[in-house]
Image (cartoon, rainbow, N blue to C red):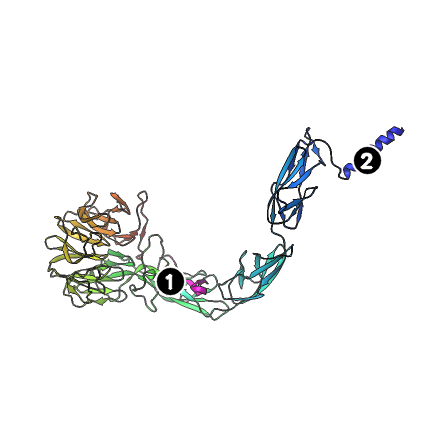
Amino acid sequence: MKIHRTRLSVLFLLALGACDGATDSRPVQALTITGGTVEVRAYEDTTLSVVATDPEGDVIEHPRLTWTTSNAAVATVDGNGKVHGVALGMAEITAQAGEVTATAHVAVTAARMMSLNVVPDTVRALPGDRVSPVVVGTDRSGSTIYVYPTWSSADTAIAVPGYYDGAVARLPGTTRLYATIDGARDSVVLVVGPPPSFTIYPDTAVLLVGDTPDHLAAERSGTAGALIDLNRIVAWTSSDPGVATVDAAGNVTAVGPGAATITATLPGTGVASTTRAYVLRYQPALDFVSWQTRDLGGCGLTRSGQAYCTMQTRYFASAPRAFATAAPAEECRILVSDSRASYYDYGRCSRFPLAVDGGHQFTSLSSGSLRACGVDMAGAVWCWGAQPQRVQGLGTVAQVAVSSEGYCALESSGNVLCWGAYNSSGTQGNGTTTPSATPTPVAGGVHFRSVAGGGLNMCGVDDGGSAWCWGANVSGQVGDGTTKTALVPTLVQTPVKFASLYVSLGTACGLDAAGKAYCWGGAPASSPVPVAAPTAQSFRALALRPAGVCGITVQGTVVCWGASIDPNAPNPGPPGSDWVSISADFDQTCAVSATGRVACWTGRSTAGVWNVVDLPRGG
């Protein structure tokens, strides 16, 4: 019995030792450190958890382990697997039992912030400003660093917080912004004052009943010329909802013909800005017979002889005009990449045409970069940027042509007279590069029956069907086999007799009596004399754009070719067989159908599909 009591005492002591954390001497077959990559803050501790099993697969509760670190400058570890974060970085912590090891990746992250200090304690801003106070944190080690906390606002009507970047001031008033990180918190007083003024862009909006809404932008000037968006802050109203309505985002919808004042007001202040909205209704729809697209807009002629032009609206302080002469960035065009109007740097465009002032009836139009001209029923020439002005010094005119430098008119007598503010390329054909402000006959005494212009050139067809060109000749577009500038009408070197000519920047083309196309100059012809187009089609009309040509066939379809389409394989244009007129500029082509529709497109066909957008024309 005495021996039995001794054995029980030993077992009791062994069990007590195990409970006190004594290690188990059983051999370790496998070791695993749970948790994968472990994160620990600098200056804080975490204990790794280890699972050890013996050869039978039984878990060893207290294995005998040795702990090591690969980088004591980042993290240390004691004999019980407790890891201490020292500095930012990565370290490998290894547990070893005999020949068996297990490794954990430890990432030491930034020390916990114990306190924050926002500098300064008060900031001032205007509506729309982004407020980003400086925040300095003191971490667990006592070090101070710049931090990016989470922000909140005591009054989100006055300021809306960002996540890491302060807040955006909205309405005038005073609120407190709170910076928080790791439980540490500090605040700053934000005082939002009213701006002295702001502006609505555009300052005139022209809308069409039934068209998509126009978007107005309320903005004020910020630092370094930056524009601060106030659209989500201001309150929008219309003086006449029967003419135009405006929603909370500044989208204006045309309701009925007339004029309305659209006002944006900054709540809680007397600061406001206004714009005029002019609403038109075309009933019936405008019935176009031709459309002259241009690099800064376009003009069209209706069946009744009225001229309509797309317009730039920014500079109209009262009633809208046809279109204004302004910097290219503020001019208007139909952009087929956007079914609505297009934004530019400073202004907004109307994408539908407005009647040219004066009530004139025209027989033909020609449009250039900044201006357009028309011949009225009496043979007088009118040109306009904003208001049509009659050109003096001409007889009865049959046709007018516009280039980038100026104008030429074909009188019914067959004489061609040219004028304009520029003549550096010799487009006035008077033998000099000196511009003439009044119509002056071209040199040479040629009797013409048609005239065409574009880019830096003019061309004409004489009574015998021969083509003559003058102006720039860098690409051989004069057609005389050279690249020498032609200051007077110069005969195009070809036996072909032409019925009509078409001119663009660096390129010219013509149609013979059978409708066969010939081109010269730059791409797609790339020849200083006329060469036949790569198509057997016969055409009624052509339109030239850089490196590309589109034409209306005698069947009424559209066919295009050139580098922007395909240099050697003409492609069908947009679908339809009732096209009657076509024109092109630098980056778009427009065609008019027999029903008065104006359709425009850019670029090349993708798998036979063209990006076509119709010009809004009411109805």
Query: What's the distance in space between the residues labelled 1 and 2, CA to CA?
Result: 90 Å
Q: Which residues are magenta?
A: 212-229
Q: Nearer the viewer, residue 571 or 183?
A: 183
Q: Label 2 amino acid?
A: Leu
Q: Is residue 208 visible?
A: no
Identity of the residue drawn at 47% across and 64% down: 234
Identity of the residue drawn at 79% across and 35% down: 15
Q: Is residue 433 visible?
A: yes
Q: Is 264 on the left or on the right of 124, as rendered?
A: left
Residue named by callout 2: 13
**First along the sequence among labels 1 and 2:** 2
Q: Nearer the viewer, residue 558 or 456?
A: 456
Residue named by callout 1: 346
Q: Is 112 on the left or on the right of 321, as rendered?
A: right
Q: Label 1 amino acid?
A: Tyr
Is 254 within the magenta?
Answer: no
Q: Secondary structure at mark 2?
A: helix
Q: Nearer the viewer, mark 1 or mark 2?
A: 2
Can you give x and y, in whole percent of width and height, for residue 147 in the image? 57, 56
Is 214 within the magenta?
Answer: yes
Can you give x and y, in whole percent of width and height, for residue 79 in the image? 70, 41
